[in-house]
Amino acid sequence: MVYEGETKVFLMENATTEIYTHVEKEIASGTVDGTTTVFTVSTAPVAVTGIVSGSPQSQYKNGSDYFRKDVLVFYRKDGADSVVDTTSNAISISGSGLTFNTAPTTTEADNVVVSYAHTKSDRSDEIINVTFSGGGRPVEYVTVQGGEKVRIEKAQESKTVQFEVLSVDGGFVHYVNGSEVSETIAGASSGSDILKGSVGSQTRTRRTIIIRVDDPETDNDRIECFFNVVGVTNEGSAPSEGYWNETCSFECPPQDYCRLTRLVGQGA
């Protein structure tokens, strides 16, 4: 039975980690003319957060504040992007189409721009440990005449997620190298084999990483969302009396990280 209430602890044995292919700021097909309400992207977005079963969800924005869910939608006007206010203009997503409740106008946008993810790879059964770091917002204090200190706020640091994983099959190295290529070759005895290879310094594919932890007592969820990441480090250890493991880290800009907490049954 699920009880409403506060989650005291999230146990990582109840966690899942999924890695998706990320698409960053694709210009959607469709003309902004005050009449068109449906805009289309090249690949159907998927519901990475699992907040709502079925269709992906766009961001929630109310005024100047927002948080991300599955798909982030912008208005691009004169080369500048602004997050669509979904409380004044709701967006529904089905397949590769995004439908606005009210057609965007030419005063709001020249184009509709969309960031989303597709093609899931579930890596939960390989992960030993997860470490989150970065995202700090440093400040500096400068002393001026009279002894007053002036605070200078620096740009927020990038956000990092690091995995310690069992090094099975191809491992995680291709996230840093950039790609993994598969070839079908003749088998050693009969039939055919698959040969996979990953060479360094290839073009890296952007990823979305979703780490979801469920509290089985309350059904509350903690969802760590890292959008638009690239792999930055991959190191390994293979002790003679142990197992081969890897440590792989990913980084994203601070605006591409979001923590979601779902509190079941506690809405108005």
Image (cartoon, rainbow, N blue to C red):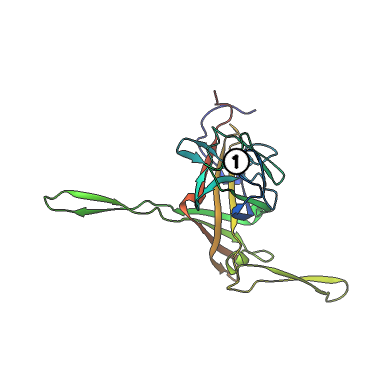
241 sits left or right of 197 in the view: left
SS for callout 1: loop
| Total numbered labels placed on residues in the image | 1
**Which residue type does callout 1 highlight?**
Ser
175 sits left or right of 181 in the view: left
For mark 1, what is the residue? 58
* Residue at point 87%, 71% (across, down): 191
Crowd tier of the residue under label 1, counting other residues whose Cα lies within 10 Å: few below 14, some 14–19, many 20 or above: many
Q: Nearer the viewer, residue 168 or 110?
A: 110
Q: Nearer the viewer, residue 132 or 72?
A: 72
Q: Is residue 129 above or below residue 3?
A: below
- Residue 242 appears in the rendering: no
Q: Nearer the viewer, residue 165 or 222?
A: 222
241 sits left or right of 96 in the view: left
Q: Position of residue 201 (x, y in %)?
A: 58, 73
Q: Quadrant of the N terminus?
A: top right
The furthest residue to the top = 268
Q: Position of residue 196 (x, y in %)?
A: 71, 70
Q: Position of residue 241 (x, y in %)?
A: 60, 68
Q: Position of residue 119 (x, y in %)?
A: 69, 53
Figure quadrant of residue 175? bottom right
Figure quadrant of residue 231? bottom right
Q: Is residue 67 above or below residue 130?
A: above
The furthest residue to the left = 146
- Residue 172 appears in the rendering: yes
Q: Quadrant of the C terminus?
A: top right
11 sits left or right of 122 in the view: left
Q: Is residue 145 above or below residue 194?
A: above
